[in-house]
Each structure stands twice: as structure tokens, then as C-alpha cells.
Amino acid sequence: MGFRIVGLLGSPLAGGNTAKLLDQALLGARDAGCEVERIDVGDLVFRPCREIFYCREHGTCAMKDDMIPLYRTFAELDSLIVATPVMTMGIPGALKSFMDRFQVFFMAKYMRNSPLVPEEKRAHRRGLYIGIAGMNVPYVFDGAKLTMKAFFSIIDVEYWDELLTRDMDNIRDITTRPDIMDEAYRKGFRLGELLFEKNP
């Protein structure tokens, strides 16, 4: 049985520190035997949610843009990795707008009692949150984690684990911290490995 893990990059930097950690996690997932796909929010053309509420009665959005095919991708994935820097004590605006467009899933799950995620997938979908922050304060990830947990819940993904690195203003280059890079790989590998353990 083939499993697919999607990596969602919330950073506008396709080759930055966040992307490097995401790529390590995806490499781990691939080495565990999963198919992997990376989606860069910065490459997508879409508009923020306008509260049209078309999705209250339909399993898609009225705004036809790059989000439309991604609803199927996110309904069918087996696990998810979201990697993002902290900006203004939260997540970047583009990523937040991306998540807000999943009102399509919210309405299906909570308003119509007809989730878009197939029942056979709901039990094994897990989420890994990879976050970096410039500041070295203990509460720097609090806002981002609340948003991440809400997003995972809406799309029927268990908030499984996290890799949070602060003080990036001093670290600057994540590749100078092989311990963190290795941990991203290990968490990605374990995320993939669990799919085969629970679904032989």
C-alpha cells in the first residue's frame, strides 16, 4: 500500500532555513517508503477567503484559483508536514490565507456532517509542525501552534509532533546545526514509518 506525505512550506524563501528543515523531513519520509510532495505556498496564486459561504452547501470554493485542485490533494494525503517561520508572533500572512481557504473542509465536517477526508484515512493522518523563530523567548511559538492545531483539526489530521527552533537571529544558518537537521530527518522518517506500522 502506497502512502503519500505532503510537505507544506509557509516561508516565502524557497531555499531558506525553513525549507531546508522541511526537505530533511521529507527525505526522511521518503526513506521510510512514502511518496512525498512539497507544496510552496509562495508559488500559489490564490485570494484570501471572502466569506462567500458557497462552501456551506458545496464541497469546493466559489473562487476558482490554485486552491481548487489542492482540496483533493489534502483530502487524500496520508500525513502532513507544515514548515513555517514565525512572523509577528504568528504565521506568515500567505500561509494564514491558505489555511483560511479550508473553510471548505470546515463546512463539510461541522456544518454538513460530511467530512471531505475519506473515513479510512482519518485514523492514520498525522501532522508534524516544523517552526523556526528569530527571537529566543519561551512563548514565541504559542500563536503559531494554536493556528496549526486548529488547521490540523479542520482537515482531520492529528497534531502528532513538532520541531521548534528559536533564536534563529543568532543561529542564522540552520545547516550549522546538524543536530536540528538530523532531528527533522528523524521525525519525517518516523512519520512515514508509522503509516506502515498501523496499516500493514
Image: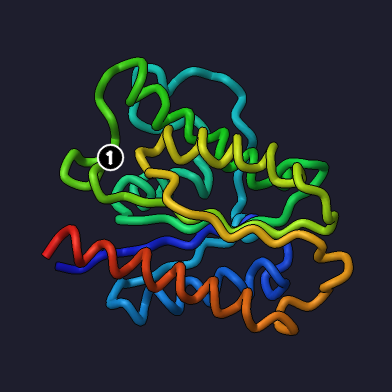
The image quadrant of residue 108 is top left
Please state, as top left, top right, bottom left or bottom right, where the N terminus lies in the image.
Answer: bottom left
Measured as percent of width and height from the top left, residue 67 is found at: 49, 45
- Residue 162 shown left or right of residue 141 in the figure: left
**Residue at image location 33% in from the left, 25% down from the top:** 109
Is 189 rendered above or below residue 118?
A: below
Is 55 rendered above or below residue 169?
A: above
**Closer to us: 150 or 171:** 171
- Residue 29 shown left or right of residue 131 in the figure: left
Q: Residue furthest left?
A: 200
Q: Circle 1 sits in a helix, a strand or a loop, which is it?
A: loop
Q: Residue furthest front?
A: 138
Amino acid carrying mark 1 in the image? Val
**Residue at image location 54% in from the left, 54% down from the top:** 129
Is 57 rendered above or below residue 41?
A: above
**Residue at image location 25% in from the left, 42% down from the top:** 122
Q: How is the image coloured?
A: rainbow
Please state, as top left, top right, bottom left or bottom right, where the C terminus lies in the image.
Answer: bottom left
- Residue 175 shown left or right of residue 44 in the figure: right
Name the residue that disc number 1 marks.
117
**Residue at image location 82% in from the left, 49% down from the top:** 137
The image quadrant of residue 142 is top right
The image quadrant of residue 173 is bottom right
